[in-house]
Amino acid sequence: MTVDAADVEARLALARTLARDAGAVALAYFNARETLVVEAKANPQDVVSIADRRVEEMLRARIAEAHPGDGVLGEEYGLTEGTSGFTWVLDPIDGTSPFVNGMPSWCVSIAVLAGEEPVVGVIYAPCVDELYAAGKGQGATLNEAPMHVSSGRSLRDGVVGLGANHHVAPAEFAGIVERLLGMGGNFIRNGSGALMLAYVAAGRLVGYYEPYMHAWDCLAGYCLVAEAGGALLPFPAVGEGLTRGAPVMAAAPGAVADLSRIAGLPRAA
């Protein structure tokens, strides 16, 4: 798909605005979370709240108003096909478990695909008022300041983010942790894969790996990391791949080889 820079810029500007507006709505629910209706999805640890649904509904309505030909894929309401070639990929609240348990490690994640390529990525963390944003060919920013992946640090003197969910066998995740620690690395897991990908783009983490992740969890972060100079394991954002999960890895140059070995994957590009 041939992409016009003006089309990317318009959607990036809208995504920035939507992320802040959605974050304000979500933060109001967060501050009144004792009143939330929370439901389990596939298992008791996989939850959704009324806040997730209301935020996605707001995002979908605003996108339809501004770009009626664009498709939308959201975690809560699935895929609505478009005609323009652009598809918005939304996670209204990534990190719902931290959200409902009163922890600040959650975010609003918005990506835009042109065909199957992420050309816009915006992640907003309302509790700390941090807006990560990137557009294809425009670099990446954190609250308007340029950001880049960590340079000069490796797995051994940096921190890696790890993620897991009910799609990942406990023994598989334990093996990843064992190999990482055995190579002298250290890790965090904060409950939001999207936010940890943003941390890779900002140079706070040297890498992130999750054996199974959905498009709405990772594609905004993928755009951020790419524009910040990091390496990525390709994600199959086309056909059924867009609605199914896949392994996700992002890394700074000094951590790519080691993190690939730990994950048992081909080296990210």
Image (spheres, grey):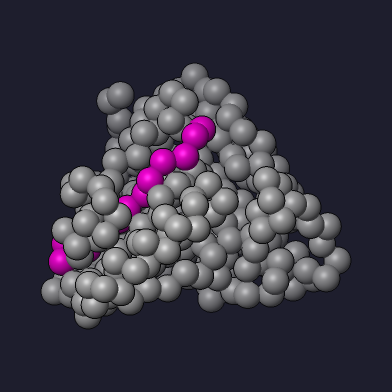
Please give left or right for residue 73 compared with residue 121 in the image. Answer: right
Task: Work out whether residue 6 or residue 234 is closer to the camera in this orientation and state it.
Answer: 234
Q: Where is residue 153? Give x, y as percent.
A: 18, 75
**Residue 107's quadrant in the figure?**
bottom right
Residue 226 in view here: no
Task: Work out whether residue 26 or residue 17 is closer to the camera in this orientation and state it.
Answer: 26
Residue drawn at x 62%, y 33% is 78
Residue drawn at x 74%, y 52% is 40
Q: Where is residue 49? Give x, y as percent.
A: 75, 55
Q: Where is residue 230? Give x, y as percent.
A: 23, 57
How many marks are shown on the rendered structure? 0
**What is the residue that sits farthest to the right in this orientation?**
35
Residue drawn at x 46%, y 47% is 213
Task: Work out whether residue 151 or residue 133 is closer to the camera in this orientation and state it.
Answer: 151
Q: Where is residue 53? Give x, y as percent.
A: 72, 47
Against 220, residue 130 (above or below) is below
Residue drawn at x 18%, y 49% is 267
Q: Does the segment drawn in magenta span residue 178? A: no
Please give left or right for residue 210 compared with residue 152 in the image. Answer: right
**What is the residue that sits farthest to the top in this orientation?**
83
**Residue 38's quadrant in the figure?**
bottom right
**Residue 172's quadrant in the figure?**
bottom left
**What is the residue that sits farthest to the bottom in this orientation?**
157
Residue 32 in view here: yes
Please give left or right for residue 102 compared with residue 35 in the image. Answer: left
Q: Quadrant of the N terminus?
A: top left
> What stretch of residues is rendered in magenta?
243-254
